[in-house]
Amino acid sequence: MMPLVAVLVFLSALSSHAQSPPSAWAFGVQRGVAIVWLPPSNDTLPATYIVLRRSAGRGNYERIAETRRGTREEFGQLCQQIGAGSFRDTLLLWFDAHEHRQTSDSVRRVIARELRGMILAQSSTVLPVARWFGTYLLDSTARAGERYDYAIESGGRRIATVESVQAGTVALPPKPTGLRAMPVDSGAHLVWDVRGTQKAGIWGYHVWRRDPRSTELRRITAEPVATIFLDESLPIAYLFADSNLRNDSLYAYAVSAVDLLGREGERSDTVTVLPFDSRPLQAPYGLLARAEGDSVIIRWHPPFEDRRAIGYHVYRWHTGDTTTRQRLTLEILHDTIWVDHPRELEGDVSYAVTAVDRYGRESQPSLPHSVPVPDVIPPALPLLLDGVGEVGQARLRWSKSPSRDVWGYEVGRSLFHPDSTITLVSLDIITDTTFIETLPIASGRTTYWYRVRVVDRHGNRSRWSLPVRIVLPDIVPPQRPQLEEVVPGDGVMTLRWSQPLAEDDVAGFLILRREDGNTTDVLLTPLGLHAAARQYTDSTVRAGILYSYSVVAFDSAGNRSKPSRRISAQCYDTRTPPVPEIDTLIVTADGVTLTWHYIGYVTEGTVAIIERSTTGETFVPISPLLPASTRRYTDGSAEITEAYYYRIVLRSPNGIYGKPSVARASAASRRQQLRR
């Protein structure tokens, strides 16, 4: 056992009293009043003190006694009595220096302060010290039952007072309160309430203990634990430390107060304590946290060479923010593995483990290990995806994913159909919500389907979004067609061609024709031919004229290919010209005027011939070769008085005559029947 001797700090404690008068106490005893006081802390050691007394609160003080400090021989006996040991010679040397005439007062005051502190620090009771200092008096002249005030003077200066002390009444120290016992390794620490100690004149306390196999308390302090000079305003961790106890055994304690006269009061209530091994537990080591699926598996090793741990507690917090640390284990865990499911968290989390002994004490946390929060749930898709095509590139934009742990986005592209194979076109994770892909113009492809998917920080990928169709402006013309042949026909030309590549973007074909001797092409198909067309018949040709043809392909954007190679040819015409119909025969002074028209197609280059007969049987030509576009002719050689028969016949450019029209008679000949 090791008592906490409060007077070990007397040197500093007494020095702190330099600005205030020393304490004095008076106790009622059977023979009167016993008075104890301390030497002044800011002066030399007085040789004598004057004690004065008066009735409590009345009259003037009267001198009742003079006390005197002990001799050097008595001082040596005191040092021997208080057990100064090796300090005895030092104390005697200091005392001699204090008493030497050549020692200055300032040095004497320092020596006096040190002597007071060291003597009181070595004393287990105050009476022997007080008797030598001359600071003790038994007033046996006081009448029992009366109350008195006392004053102490030294060198003509009052150094202490005590008021309203009742003579002849013995009052033992009060019963201590507030006793607490705190278990430690193989021992116990005791603390109790010492407020009012100095005022009550309590020098210290005895400690009592009951061992596990005993039924009675036994005093374990040879001398009181001095507490009179403790600063009562400061917190006290403990006042007495008991050691060499058996761990896990129950002990009981009590304390009793001892006043300056050495009188002991009633013991306090008992308290019990169970000492235990209070050495700090070693922490677990080798902690490893590993994310698997939606869980984190934590493993560790037990404390090294510390068998007191009976289990563990697991802690978790957001990495970098220890204020969020929380204990995951509601009860002590007896295994060295723990599975956590931090689904509600994001970012990185840290784990640590503490060891727990059978008293519920925990060790310091192990070294932490941080891992990303496991996540197998794919992030949510953006709510909006839009795109626009530009020359040579596709521009995409989309809204942010509502998920909070988004790392970025990936873009996929389909070439032929929204449901065809998706090709990943973003080589890196896109952290923005826009994407531009440069596309080869020479490919001629203008329609693409794009999708977006979201990637979170754990590598989870969402499904692909619905596709958005992007059409690029088409500035690439189709491949020029291959004109294979131009076949002359009976009044027609037939063209045949092929398209080298089966291009989806070919919208149709244009036919160009050029007549021999001209340098300008004539567009025969202003509206174009269908994309599936591979043949065209030109029926506007004339026999005997050399024509050259070429074919041009065009796409849906209006881009035209280069013309195909040219092929020249001329057609023939074996068709019989149509039969003319005479509309009118009018006899005038100028002759007979005919008008007519044709039913059917008249080939360019066809000529009309007017024939006349007087009998209606034999007809002779009377006109030059008239262009087929002529629709009127006047026979100026006809006699007005004569009747004539007229008919018209067409001759093709190839010399083929058509069937003559129905003969018509002039006005004079209408009376004669037409012979056929």
Image: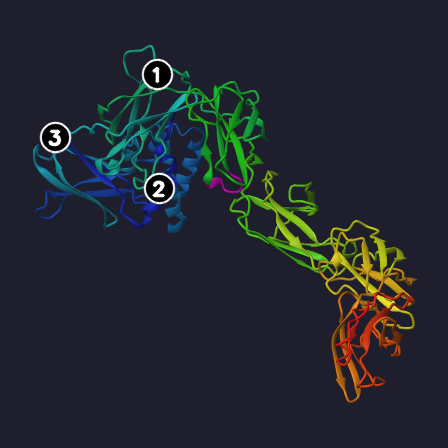
Give the x, y percent position of residue 231.
32, 40
In screen coordinates, is 495 left or right of 369? right
- Distance, label 3 to label 2, CA atoms, is 32 Å
Q: Is residue 99 visible?
A: no
Which circle, 3 or 1, is nearer the viewer? 1
- Across and down, in percent, residue 203 comes to 27, 32
Q: Earlier in the sequence, mark 3 or mark 1?
A: 3
Q: Is residue 422 above or below residue 384?
A: above
Residue in the image at 39% along x and 20% along y: 275
Residue 388 spot, x, y in % from top left: 63, 57
- Crowding at mark 2 (Cα within 10 Å: few <14, some 14-19, many 20+): some
Left or right of 452? Residue 62 is left
Amino acid, disc 3: Thr
Q: Secondary structure at mark 3?
A: loop
Q: Quadrant of the C terminus?
A: bottom right
Q: Which residues are magenta?
A: 318-323
Foreground: disc 1 or disc 2? 1
Q: Which residue does the numbered mark 1 point to in the structure image?
A: 250
572 is higher (above) or lower (below) than 243: below
Q: Judge from the rendering whether residue 18 lies leftward or rightward of residue 604; answer left or right.
A: left
Residue hosting label 3: 169
Dot 2 falls on a residue whose secondary structure is helix
Q: Which quadrant is the N terminus positioned in?
A: top left
Residue lying furthest top in this view?
Answer: 213
Disc marking residue 13:
2
Position of 163 relative to 89 (above/below)? below
416 or 547: nearer the viewer: 547
Q: Distance of mark 1 from mark 2, alpha carbons? A: 37 Å
- Under mark 2, the amino acid is Ala
**Distance CA(mark 3)–CA(mark 1):** 41 Å
Q: In the image, what residue occupies the spot 48% across and 25% down?
A: 279
* SS assignment at label 1: loop
